[in-house]
Amino acid sequence: MQKRKLGNSGLEVSALGFGCMGMSFSYGPPKDKQEMTSVLRAAVERGITFFDTAEVYGPFLNEELVGEALAPFRDRVVIATKFGFDLSPDLDPRGMKGSPGLNSRPEHIKQAAEGSLKRLKVDVIDLLYQHRVDPNVPIEDVAGAASG
């Protein structure tokens, strides 16, 4: 499998990445957890090292699935996740009641990152980025919060 370096940090990933959204969001109800775990682990065995998720997928379910499924390979994979949505606490377990609003205020980014760390069961988020631009928050504030 070919590799790619992302940015200047030295983060290296497989040229082919694995977008995990459809496993628990957007394309019907969440898929069978054991089956999706098998799919993710088979991808690692075939050389995929870059996996993309987000707190909004599920919401929250996808990060939990990815974290658990990839735990045995943590030293071999890079997990990217995203922030930027205001996920209301009154969510239906089957998904969101309507579209979430945007929220990239620095205090919310910190809260979102802490939640992602717990759901992914990791000490470090390899790649964290903004899912959608929040026009109400200066990009410099977003960048400062996301990098610190």
Image: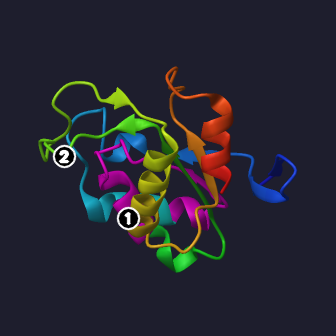
Residue 10 in view of the camera: yes
121 relative to 142, above or below? below
Label 2 to label 1: alpha-carbon separation: 16 Å
Residue type highlighted by circle 2: Pro
SS at mark 1? helix
Please say whether residue 61 is one of the residues in the magenta stretch.
yes
Instruction: State which region is magenta.
Output: 42-68
According to the image, label 2 marks what residue? 89
Measuring from the top left, give residue 74's x and y in whole percent: 58, 74
For the N terminus, the quadrant is: bottom right
**In the image, is 144 to the left or to the right of 44?**
right
Contact check, label 2 and label 1, Cβ < 8 Å? no
According to the image, label 1 marks what residue? 119
Picture quadrant where residue 97 is located:
top left
Q: Residue 4 carries which label?
A: none
Front position in the image: 78 or 85 = 85
- Outermost residue, top side: 135
Residue type highlighted by circle 1: Arg
Residue beneath the point at 24% across and 47% down: 30
Front position in the image: 73 or 120 = 120
